């Protein structure tokens, strides 16, 4: 196990633990505190108690690093700190399953609340983490700002003084994770709501609300931002330095949300706060009645009205409650009027009650939120932050109660510290002698004794019939408590105070453990009674506001309780009793807060003030008790670990049990036997001197050890360095040798290679030489052989050549001779016309060859085949062309001879068409490839035209559908056109009815255009029968055929009169009586491909023909 040897004894300023103070006196105690305070050491221990001196400045000792430093460390290990106490408490709660309580005491402004927050934040930081746990932590921590806003106020002692007691139980599970908490509140100082002493303020929330709320919220709450408008807010110290009310208001709203307040709940709370402010502004005036008494009336009803609106109360009900008081007794109701003073009293009582009940409700509401869920057993850590002991100039009932509470705490401190101390000695088996200390049980008894305690007397007075005043109460005290040592009163039987002028008549004085306090009895009875007129509580109950109704349950007329409610004193005593019982079951941890000055200023240490606190807190006694037996104790293991270097036998290791080691150590150091005792697990050192002796020896020894360690370390370091150098040198040498050898080897290797190559070269050259010699020998032989063969061959060749020459010569000579012989023989046959014969023969041969060739290369028999073989001889050019022409004519004749008569007629027609139109009309070209069918309608076969067919006697040569152009608009009407040898017939296309029948002789001419259109005009002989209706302007798809046929019929007719065909782009047509000009123009391409005919005027029809492609 690692045992840390750092301790609070190291680097100590003064002494960290007062128990070690030597010599121990009040002066040295305070001097030690001052010394530490001056060095910013605000925490000092008395054993396990932490003394905290308020620094009044922010300290850098609460950082997360500090939290880590103190986490899981032994209490005395580090310099004193509140974190050490919190850590100790948390660990014994978690690890030893002991419920803990942290009791924080000290007077107002000494830093109790801050200390409690530090403890809580430390525990929150070190305990478990996780989403759920963090939420619980956050809620627990955020309950503080809410409670502080409603329960804290600025007082002369403290700008943020808690005006209520608070005890918070934080509950943990077995792992030490927080589960939730329960807050108990004690006696809120509610008188502050209506009146504040000079230099003090009302509760923070009033100022926060007015400065921090938005205009909108204030308007809703009918409030004004100006503090001076409210009677209940003291003005002289409304603004506190360093306190940002507006920012705090936002913090509080946020905290309320985190803690779990609903938005409407927050709103209700603020409404109640506003209502209290409004209530303070209600004023009363007297109104005389006929019986001579004065009755109170509300002066200005505006505030009353607004308050009633806020809380949903009927104004008249509340107004009445401020003027009358109903007393119910034994089924009897008596109503009395209130005078002005009583009305004010009632108003203030209502305000106080309203506020204090609101506060209690907030606590309950927070508890609901932070309540632990699990039903398993919890470990509990209680943190008690209760108002400190208070001594004012004017002390009243509240101070009495507060101081009583502090007495009880002191009591429990005494009891538990001593008991704890005693128990430790018993546990450790050490002998214990009792120590004298002041036990304040007697003061507690004076206050709380059931029979004759002050609180019991007060209750008795309050419940007694008859007139009860504060004076009768004091009288009673004077008689009952006169004998008590701690009770002082001028008028008691004990005559020793008769002439004590510091003790006024209407007061009594108690000698508290923390000093004498003079209480003024005025108000004791009232405050103890804490009366709120029933009419008021009933008025509140009638409110149409859920929260306020809930706060005044006694106002419910159905539950009228005639019994008096328990008095304030009684309630407080009971709750303090419960608290004490609760604390007694837990392991206490103390934080004693001390206030260094009255000015709330840093760096000022007012000795008298501190001395007073040290005295009444009983700190000296605490030290004495702690030292009575043994000043210092420590478990054996850490003790041995810390001091083992002081003895050779225990240094550096002790193998046996720690206790024996410590015994050996002590014997070796010759510490006198009476100076220490051996407990079961701890050694107890009686005198701090002994501890310091040990510490001093340890310090010296540590120095020696440090030197030794340094020496050994230096030696080790040098040796290590040397070894390192040596090792390095070897490595370097090895590497170098290797390198050198490598080099040498490489040299030898290359030398060998050179030698080797020389030898090999020499050998190779030798071999080469031999081979060359051998080869040369072979070559020489070959050459000689070749030469020899060459010579042989040449010789042979020469012989053969000479032989051939000889043979040739013989042949030539023989040929010459032969020729000569032949010439001489045939000379007689070669005479005069031999040349011509040879020529004719040659020509004949050539022609023969030409014709035979032409026969083989003749082209095909197709008349359109243009091929013809090329001529072979120039002199045959004419013949060749002529033959070609003859061949073509013959080929055409052959072709024609195949035709039948009909086909011939067709071609003749085509020929006629070409004669008529070729190069004259653009339409002709497209008609060449179209066969002339004649009967396009199949008139003889189609039954539809049977009647029409039968109406013409001649054979139909042409039957076609044409358009008859209407003169009026140029549009066409379809007609069937029939052509026979004798007539032209136009008939209706649908019905087949003959519309016109023109005998061919009546036709004089036909007019067509030169263009690509099918228009034609049939012009009739003037005066003929057919000419009555005028000429016909027609258009036909088969114009060329139609006209050709007409023309042909004309030419073959017996009378032999020719039909004229006029081809012109402008011609006249006779319509009945008028002559109309038909004009053909080239149409623009936009008109498309169709021919259109338009009547331009009476005398002009314009035919637009698209330009032919
Ligand atoms: N540990 C501390 N560090 C710094 N300032 C402190 C510390 N303890 C207290 N104070 C100051 O003292 C003031 C009063 O402390 P507080 O805890 O409210 O006193 P108490 O609760 O005892 O009346 C605080 O508002 C704060 O300014
Ligand atoms: Mg406080």
Image (cartoon, grey):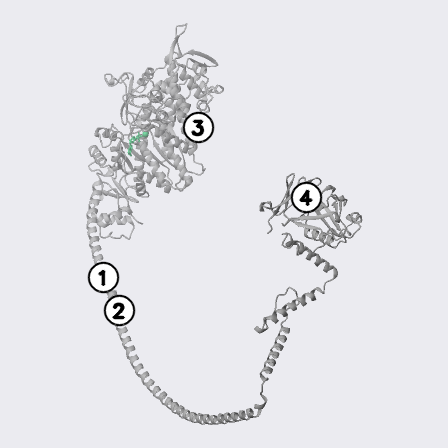
Which of labels 1 and 4 is toward the front? 4
Q: Which mark, by number, is residue 28?
A: none
Nearer-the-camera pick, 234 or 400: 234
CA gap between label 2 and label 3 equals 91 Å
In the image, the residue with mark 1 has its CB under 8 Å from the nearest atom of ligand 1? no
First-in-chain label (2 vs 3): 3
- The x, y position of residue 331, in whole percent, is 48, 14
Horizontally, residue 574 falls left or right of residue 633, namely right
Q: Which mark, by number, is residue 739?
A: 2
Q: Quadrant of residue 858?
A: bottom right
The residue carrying pointer 1 sits among few (fewer than 14), some (14 to 19) or many (20 or more) residues within 10 Å by Cα, namely few
In the image, the residue with mark 2 has its CB under 8 Å from the nearest atom of ligand 1? no
Q: Which mark, by number, is residue 725?
A: 1
Ligand 1 quadrant in view = top left
Question: Label 4 belongs to which residue?
Answer: 1069
Instruction: Indicate the secondary structure of the residue bearing disc 3.
Output: helix
CA gap between label 2 and label 1 equals 21 Å
Instruction: Indicate the secondary structure of the residue bearing disc 4.
Output: strand
First-in-chain label (1 vs 3): 3
- The x, y position of residue 843, in whole percent, is 60, 78
């Amino acid at each position: 196990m690692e045992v840390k040897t750092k301790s609070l004894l190291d680097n100590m300023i003064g002494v960290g633990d007062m128990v070690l103070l030597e010599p121990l006196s009040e002066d040295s105690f305070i001097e030690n505190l001052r010394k530490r305070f001056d060095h910013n050491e605000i925490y000092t221990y008395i054993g396990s108690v932490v003394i905290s001196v308020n620094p009044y400045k922010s300290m850098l000792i609460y950082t997360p690093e500090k939290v880590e430093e103190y986490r899981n460390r032994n209490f005395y290990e580090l310099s004193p700190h509140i974190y050490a106490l919190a850590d100790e408490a948390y660990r014994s709660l978690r690890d030893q399953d002991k419920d803990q309580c942290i009791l924080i005491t000290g007077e107002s402004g000494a830093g109790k609340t801050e200390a409690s927050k530090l403890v809580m934040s430390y525990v929150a930081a070190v305990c478990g983490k996780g989403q759920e746990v963090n939420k619980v932590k956050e809620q627990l921590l955020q309950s503080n700002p809410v409670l502080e806003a409603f329960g804290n106020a600025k007082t002369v002692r403290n700008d943020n003084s808690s005006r209520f007691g608070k005890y918070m139980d934080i509950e943990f599970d077995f792992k030490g994770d927080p589960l939730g908490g329960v807050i108990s509140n004690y006696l809120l100082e509610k008188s502050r709501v209506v009146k504040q002493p000079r230099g003090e303020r009302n509760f923070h929330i009033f100022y926060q609300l007015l400065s921090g709320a938005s205009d909108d919220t204030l308007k809703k709450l009918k409030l004004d931002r100006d503090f001076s408008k409210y009677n209940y807010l003291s003005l002289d110290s409304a603004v506190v330095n360093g306190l940002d009310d507006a920012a705090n208001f936002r913090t509080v709203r946020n905290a309320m949300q985190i803690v779990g307040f609903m938005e409407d709940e927050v709103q209700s709370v603020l409404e109640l706060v506003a209502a209290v402010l409004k209530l303070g502004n209600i004023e009363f005036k007297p109104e005389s009645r006929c019986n001579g008494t004065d009755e109170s009336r509300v002066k200005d009803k505006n505030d009353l009205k607004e308050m009633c609106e806020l809380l949903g109360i009927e104004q008249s009900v509340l107004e009445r409650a401020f003027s009358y008081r109903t007393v119910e007794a034994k089924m009897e109701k008596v109503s009395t009027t209130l005078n002005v003073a009583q009305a004010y009293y009632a108003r203030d009582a209502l305000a106080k009650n309203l506020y204090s009940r609101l506060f209690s409700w907030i606590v309950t509401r927070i508890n609901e939120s932070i309540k632990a869920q699990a039903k398993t057993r919890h470990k509990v850590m209680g943190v008690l932050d209760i108002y400190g002991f208070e001594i004012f100039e004017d002390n009243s009932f509240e101070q009495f109660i507060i101081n009583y509470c502090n007495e009880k705490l002191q009591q429990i401190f005494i009891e538990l510290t001593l008991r704890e101390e005693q128990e430790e000695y018993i546990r450790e088996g050490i002998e214990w002698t009792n120590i004298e200390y002041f036990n304040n049980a007697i003061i507690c008894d004076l206050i709380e004794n059931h029979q004759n305690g002050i609180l019991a007397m007060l209750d008795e007075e309050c419940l007694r019939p008859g007139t009860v005043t504060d004076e009768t109460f004091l009288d009673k005290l004077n008689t009952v408590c006169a004998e008590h040592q701690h009770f002082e009163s001028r008028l008691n039987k004990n005559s020793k105070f008769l002439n004590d002028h510091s003790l006024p008549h209407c007061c009594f004085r108690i000698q508290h453990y923390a000093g004498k306090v003079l209480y003024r009895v005025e108000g004791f009875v009232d405050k103890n009674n804490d009366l709120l007129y029933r009419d008021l509580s009933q008025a509140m109950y009638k409110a149409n506001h859920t929260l306020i109704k809930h706060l005044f349950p006694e106002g419910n007329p159905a539950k009228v309780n005639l019994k008096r409610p328990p008095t304030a004193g009684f309630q407080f005593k009971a709750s303090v009793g419960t608290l004490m019982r609760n604390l007694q079951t837990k392991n206490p941890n103390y934080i004693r807060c001390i206030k260094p000055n009255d000015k709330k200023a840093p760096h000022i240490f007012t000795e008298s003030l501190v001395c007073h606190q040290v005295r009444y807190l009983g700190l000296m006694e605490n030290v004495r008790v702690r030292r009575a037996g043994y000043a210092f104790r420590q478990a054996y293991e850490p003790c041995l670990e810390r001091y083992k270097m002081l003895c050779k036998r225990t240094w550096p290791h002790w193998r046996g049990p720690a206790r024996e080691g410590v015994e050996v150590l002590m014997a070796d150091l010759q510490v006198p036997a009476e100076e220490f005792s051996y407990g079961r697990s701890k050694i107890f050192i009686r005198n701090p001197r002994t501890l310091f002796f040990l510490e001093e020896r340890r310090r010296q020894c540590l120095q020696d050890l440090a030197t030794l360690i340094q020496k050994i370390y230096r030696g080790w370091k040098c040796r290590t360095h040397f070894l390192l150098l040596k090792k390095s040198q070897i490595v370097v040498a090895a590497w170098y040798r290797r390198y050198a050898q490598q080099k040498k080897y490489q040299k030898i290797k290359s030398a060998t290679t050179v030698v080797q190559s020389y030898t090999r070269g020499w050998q190779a050259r030798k071999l080469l030489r031999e081979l060359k010699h051998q080869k040369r020998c072979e070559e020489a032989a070959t050459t000689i052989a070749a030469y020899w063969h060459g010579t042989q061959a040449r010789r042979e060749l020469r012989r053969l050549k000479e032989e051939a020459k000889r043979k040739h010569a013989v042949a030539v000579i023989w040929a010459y001779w032969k020729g000569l012989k032949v010439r001489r023989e045939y000379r007689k046959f070669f005479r005069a016309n031999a040349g011509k014969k040879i020529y004719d023969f040659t020509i004949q041969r050539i022609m023969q060859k030409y014709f035979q060739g032409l026969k083989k290369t003749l082209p095909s028999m197709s008349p359109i085949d243009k091929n013809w073989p090329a001529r072979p001889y120039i002199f045959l050019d004419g013949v060749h062309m002529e033959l070609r022409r003859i061949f073509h004519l013959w080929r055409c004749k052959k072709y024609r001879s195949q035709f039948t008569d009909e086909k011939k007629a067709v071609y003749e027609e085509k020929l006629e068409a070409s004669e008529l139109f070729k190069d004259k009309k653009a339409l002709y070209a497209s008609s060449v490839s179209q066969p002339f069918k004649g009967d396009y309608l199949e008139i003889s076969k189609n039954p539809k035209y049977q009647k029409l067919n039968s109406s013409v006697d001649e054979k139909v040569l042409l039957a076609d559908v044409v358009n008859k152009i209407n003169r009026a608009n140029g549009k066409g009407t379809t007609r069937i056109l029939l052509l026979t040898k004798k007539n032209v017939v136009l008939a209706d296309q649908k019905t087949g009815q003959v519309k016109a029948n023109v005998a061919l002789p009546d036709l004089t001419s036909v007019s067509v255009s030169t263009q690509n259109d099918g228009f034609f005009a049939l012009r009739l002989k003037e005066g003929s029968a057919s000419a009555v209706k005028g000429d016909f302007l027609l258009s036909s798809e088969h114009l060329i055929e139609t006209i050709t046929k007409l023309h042909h019929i004309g030419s073959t007719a017996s009378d032999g009169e020719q039909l004229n065909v006029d081809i012109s782009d402008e011609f006249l047509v006779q319509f009945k009586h008028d002559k109309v000009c038909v004009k053909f123009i080239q149409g623009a391409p936009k008109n498309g491909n169709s021919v259109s005919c338009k009547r331009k005027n009476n005398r002009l029809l314009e035919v637009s023909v698209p330009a032919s492609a």
